[in-house]
Amino acid sequence: MSNNTTRHQIVEAADRLFYQRGYEHTSFADIADTVKISRGNFYYHFKSKDDILEAVIDLRLSNTKGMLNKWEAEADTPAERIKSYIRILLTNWNNIKQFGCPVGTLCTELAKLNHASQEEASAVFTVFRVWLRDQFTRTGHKKEADTLALRVLAWSQGVATMASTFQDEQFVRKEVERMCCWVESLTSDKE
Amino acid sequence: MSNNTTRHQIVEAADRLFYQRGYEHTSFADIADTVKISRGNFYYHFKSKDDILEAVIDLRLSNTKGMLNKWEAEADTPAERIKSYIRILLTNWNNIKQFGCPVGTLCTELAKLNHASQEEASAVFTVFRVWLRDQFTRTGHKKEADTLALRVLAWSQGVATMASTFQDEQFVRKEVERMCCWVESLTSDKE
DNA sequence: TCTCAATTAGGACATTTGACCTATAATTAG
DNA sequence: CTAATTATAGGTCAAATGTCCTAATTGAGA
């Protein structure tokens, strides 16, 4: 599968638009305009809008796994890897301040729509969760690993929501710092 | 202003529907069906959908202030008052697990729509923030009061998002407990 | 009882949206 | 080169949506 196929372009455009405008508020025309294909065309590639959503979620799952693998390779210790996750808040700040967390906001929207792909969407969170759990396990926190993972997710979700509401980068910096210190304090005596 | 006016019924129905289905995904027909009035009727009361949103936000602002006043009267110490806020996660759990936090999810949605009422919506958060700041100030944390207030908001936002994504009540209970302990530890030596 | 303003009902309308269809172009296989 | 498959364009359609308009109903005061 090349990455220049029309299908792939549709999914990438939908990915971006679903994130920036929300799923419901993104129309076929929006996607068609972005990809510069005719409206009717993507009924050749996808049989419905829900179908595109599924493809977008699959793309996100795959991108997420790729990113985690990269962190796994680049960082030497579990603590550093967890910090890689925490720091997305800063590296992706320009997007987050405008559109929030891509994972969290999609899950929230689908919940309100009572959409069939709710579980698929939350699977992206699960990928992060399992990966973070693994990192915590390796630091010796076997029993609480899952709770700690969930805590990191919740923490960054909350910071993202508040930061984007108030457009407060300073708050994000402070909280990221605190979270990193917390991770350090949890893991400093083990390895 | 009576609370039985058609106008008030419209606002209350819209309040609930905007929360449960989202602003964009709630149609005039939905509201009309709920209130059992004709579609055309609320153009007598409101000149547009945005107009209804403003009224809904005003209602939420007013309800929020009422709730804070109640907590102010019922709890004796600032710490207990802060805990009242934290415990909404549990007292309102049935709604939160389905629809998330009403304040946070609206702010997030309006941000993506780039809607004119974004700031009005975030004002609801500000009401909580100022109130929490006051409580922290009274415990002696003058300088960090605002940061602590923002931290409480972020914390509960994150827990709400993750809990509703994974439908995990146990996690909420644990986190609420932790947050309350944290508040206690911050305030135990002052008053 | 009559009047007039406030309120409500319900239809009309232009637009948008997701979906479908058919004709044509491009590409590949034999 | 030809046939067949793949891909794209663009039109059409029904349903839904926000908005507007006008006629009917209500109710209080003169």
Image (cartoon, coloured by chain):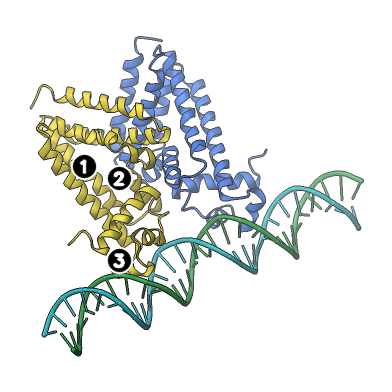
Chain colours: A yellow, B blue, C cyan, D green
Q: Classify mark 3: helix, strand or loop.
A: loop
The answer as to whether the residues below labels 2 and 1 share one chain is yes
Asked if the residue under mark 3 is in contact with the one under mark 2, i.e. CB atoms within 8 Å, the reply is: no
Q: How crowded is mark 1: few (under 14 residues within 10 Å), some or many (20 or more)?
A: many
Name the quadrant containing residue C14: bottom right
Residue type indicated by callout 1: Phe
Residue type indicated by callout 3: Phe
Q: Residue A103 carries which label?
A: 2
* Residue at the spot of label 3: A46
Residue A91 in the image, given as x and y percentages of width and height: 27, 36
Residue A9 in the image, given as x and y percentages of width and height: 28, 59
Asked if the residue under mark 1 is in contact with the one under mark 2, i.e. CB atoms within 8 Å, the reply is: yes
Residue A146, compared with residue B28, is above or below; it is: above
Q: How crowded is mark 3: few (under 14 residues within 10 Å), some or many (20 or more)?
A: some
Q: In this view, does B149 lie to the left or right of B9?
A: left
Near-viewer residue (A158 or A177): A177
Residue D15 in the image, given as x and y percentages of width and height: 48, 68
Residue type indicated by callout 2: Val
Alpha carbon distance from label 3 to label 1: 28 Å
Point 52% across, 21% down: residue:
B73
Q: Residue A128 carries which label?
A: 1
Point 12% across, 34% down: residue:
A75
Residue A166, compared with residue B117, is above or below; it is: above
Mark earlier in primary sequence (2, 3): 3
Q: In this view, does B188 lie to the left or right of A186?
A: right
Alpha carbon distance from label 2 to label 1: 10 Å
